Image (tube, helix red, strand yellow):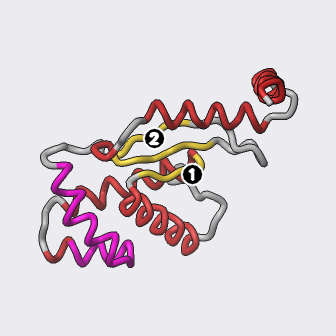
Amino acid sequence: MRKVKPARKLGRTTAHRKATLSNLSTQLLIHKRIETTEAKAKETRKVVEKIITKARKGTHHAQREIFSALRNKEAVQELFEEIVGRIGSRNGGYTRIIKLAPRFGDAAKMAVIELVDFAEAPAAASTAAKQDRAKRVKGSKKAETEKEGGESAE
């Protein structure tokens, strides 16, 4: 009987998928917060959680294994020097995914993935995204009222 594999393919070949997840993981470790599609965020979370758990060991072997996955010295250095020290004794759950409004062009489900201990203001990000969407949507009531308010103020 055929069994379903748990990973998402993301519409890519194996090599392309691994490269995409590696790049997303690298950017998340460097910038602490990235915006991407919901499916990519969920897959990136799996990769990053394993990498951070491995980095908590602090061994040279762990550092080499992580470098082989990320291929970015800056990200590995950031991980071992700053992120691991700040995470401390947290047992998993190093990342948070916040769902956003759909992307304007293709209505893809969007999300922000961030490192938990580095989050600044998660509520402010989602509020800003909603306000931006109201401005972009043609004919929305908020956009029209803001437009009228801006014209009368001039």
**24 with respect to 78 (left or right):** right
Is-magenta flag for residue 70? yes
Q: Amino acid at mark 2?
A: Ile
Asked if 77 appears above or below 25 in the picture, the reply is: below
Q: Secondary structure at mark 1?
A: strand
Q: Residue at x 50, y 44 (%)?
A: 112
**Residue 94 position within the rendered picture, expressed as x and y whole percent measured from the top left:** 30, 46
Residue farthest toward the front in the current orientation of the protein: 154
Magenta stretch bounds? 63-87
Return the residue at label 1.
Answer: 36
Residue 117 visible? The answer is: yes
Q: Are marks 2 and 1 in contact (CB under 8 Å)?
A: no
Is-magenta flag for residue 12? no
Labelled disc at residue 97: 2
Q: Quadrant of residue 82?
A: bottom left
Q: Quadrant of residue 101?
A: top right
**104 with respect to 63 (left or right):** right
Asked if 97 appears above or below 46 in the picture, the reply is: above
Q: Secondary structure at mark 2?
A: strand
Labelled disc at residue 112: none
Q: Quadrant of residue 152?
A: top right
Q: Residue at x 39, y 41 (%)?
A: 96
**59 with respect to 124 (left or right):** left
Asked if 141 appears above or below 89 in the picture, the reply is: above
Residue 5 visible? The answer is: no
